[in-house]
Amino acid sequence: MTARAFAFVLAALGTAGVSAPAAAQLGGGTSPLAVEVRGGIALPVAAFKEDLNLETGLAASASVSLSITPQIAVYGGYAWNQFIESGATTVGEDVHLTDRGFSAGVRLGLPASSSAFSPWIKGGAVMGHKLRHNFESGHSSDTDGDLGFEVGGGLDFALGRQVSFSPGVTYTRFALKDALPGDDKVQHVAVDVGLRIRI
């Protein structure tokens, strides 16, 4: 993680921290701080999939969020996605392609007609990402990513006052530094489920 990325995430959470007492009151005593872990599949899309012959992979992430109001929260997190780049070399050696990095943004809860669930959407910046090629022969190479963005949405199903089950979808896109024109965009969709705990 670069110093700039670390500072960005801390600034987002730190700035929101001044609103924590108000958020707690608005939430009826519920803590404004929440942690979330997610896991599922990662779907490469567009030229990122076709040019590299990528297969569907795995997605995992973790984040911390702080509520400003009952509907609005800021978040910071870390995501890991892995794909298989089949037949990437002339000898048919498989390559595991890993994208990992940080994000910070805003999560918005939406009104729902049912008390059983509540929809949400999110949007933010992705930063400090690295794309790593791990070859079967044991060596690897990294390519740094530029600042990008992510957008997503899903549903929260309450499992209690403090815990919710949260299926969702997130689209991520960022450019690669020092990449050839036409081969510089990383794009994928994570289809996953999460466990969100207010602490």
Image: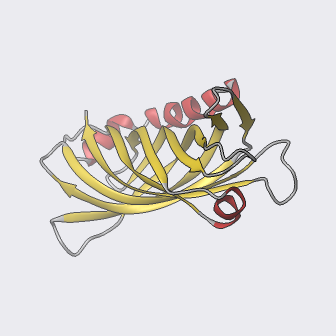
Q: At x 42% / y 38%, what residue is drawn? A: 63
Residue 161 showing in the rendered view = yes
Q: What is the residue that sits farthest to the front in this orientation?
A: 91
Q: List x then y, in percent, for residue 122.
A: 47, 57
Q: At x 39% / y 40%, what residue is drawn? A: 66
Number of numbered callouts drawn = 0
Scheme of image coloration: secondary structure
Quadrant location of the C terminus in the rendered image:
top left
14 shown above or below 92: above
Which one is nearer the viewer's eye here, 113 or 62?
Answer: 62
Quadrant location of the N terminus in the rendered image:
top right
Q: Is residue 3 left or right of residue 195?
A: right
Q: List x then y, in percent, for residue 95.
A: 62, 42
4 shown above or below 63: above
Q: What is the residue that sits farthest to the bottom in this orientation?
A: 113
Q: At x 81% / y 42%, what residue is drawn? A: 177
Q: List x then y, in percent, for residue 107.
A: 44, 53
Q: List x then y, in percent, for residue 14.
A: 51, 30
Q: At x 74% / y 37%, what residue is drawn? A: 143
Quadrant location of residue 127?
top right
182 shown above or below 35: below
Which one is nearer the viewer's eye here, 134 or 180?
Answer: 134
Which one is nearer the viewer's eye here, 63 or 86?
Answer: 86
Residue 129 showing in the rendered view = no
Q: What is the residue that sits farthest to the top in this orientation?
A: 3
